Image (spheres, rainbow, N blue to C red):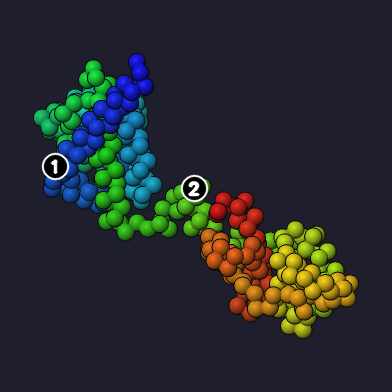
Amino acid sequence: MTRHAYIDLGLAVLKTEADAISALCERLDQDFGRACDLILNCNGRIVVTGMGKSGHIGNKIAATLASTGTPSFFMHSGEASHGDLGMITAEDLVIALSNSGETSEITLLLPLLKRLGIPLLALTGKAGSTLARSADIHLDVSVSKEACPLGLAPTSSTTATLAMGDALAVAVLEARGFTEQDFAHSHPGGNLGRRLLLRVSDIMHTGDAVPLVNTQTTLKDTLLEMTAKGLGMAGVIDAASNRLAGIYTDGDLRRTFDKMPDIKTALVRDYMTANCVTIDAERIASEALKIMHDKKINALMVVDAKNEIQGALNMHDLLRAGVV
């Protein structure tokens, strides 16, 4: 088979699956709205169940719901009748996935769910199926054909079900008023979580790790302090008030040597950057990144409302923390 033939087959699959999703738009009706209300008003958790490929899709739908503010988990239909049904409470809502609507492991559960009074939302490809007729709400995710040339492997049908699950999750997300901050709390290990949750105080250097000199320190001793602490700068403290008077950076060092002073006697106060840019310890770390980017600097002193030094950080600290 030629590479062009592979490409043609790939395009045919993508078009078939795209058509399957497009067809869902024409069938989205009041039942979808009722399904969203059912999920939104659930006082317990959303229990998604399915077998085979539908089970894999159900696992993803449950994960999407959970990460967007709707407590959810996946329950394997085959394990449900062997004890896992005990995970469901009367406050929960079950979403059952089955293209045929006749999956035996799911239909076996229907009388039990009805007896417990647990609401059932079904996503099937057969409106007249056992599962569809038993559900409180049924969403039609039928497709005209599978993308598989044999018409056997679940392809278009699983794509349509997954898309419907995403539509439910996003609609409910909007209804909840779910924010970026909410998303970050459920994704603390991701890039968004780090950007929205990590504060300057979490990554700044403190105590003896902060390079500090006072206004009476010579350039020589200032350079020794910068070298020892390795942040590419030193905060300069007013000896009288113990507050930040300025900063001396690698950039200041280059500018200093244009004037060729005697570093053994020259004082840092005459070459530092006064009124330097600072940041509060409780600011979000990503704000420190923006300040550095906008001001074209590589380090910041961290001060409180009285301009007293709390810590220091540089671009490498942000890189290590995954903020960049």
Which quadrant holds residue 60?
top left
Q: Tell me residue 129's x, y (percent).
A: 13, 28
- Residue 85 in sight here: no
Q: Quadrant of the N terminus?
A: top left
Residue 23 shows in the view: yes
1 or 2: mark nearer the eye:
1
Could you tell whether 151 is left or right of 251 in the image?
Answer: left
Indicate the position of residue 318 as horizontal and vertical percent values.
Answer: 60, 56
The kind of residue on which mark 1 rests is: Glu
The amino acid at mark 2 is Gly
Q: State the image coordinates of residue 120 (x, y, percent, origin top left).
A: 21, 39
Q: Is residue 169 above or below residue 202?
A: above
Which residue is pictured at 29% across the width and 46% down the height? 169
Residue assigned mark 2: 190
Label 1's element? helix
**Residue under the point 16% across and 37% down:** 23
On screen, residue 101 above or below 21? above
Asked whether the beta carbons under mark 1 and mark 2 sit within 8 Å of each other, the answer is no
Towards the viewer: 96 or 265? 265
What residue sits right under mark 1 in the picture? 26
Q: Secondary structure at mark 2?
A: loop
As drawn, the residue found furthest toward the front would be 258
User: Which residue occupies the foreground of this view, 149 or 303?
Assistant: 149
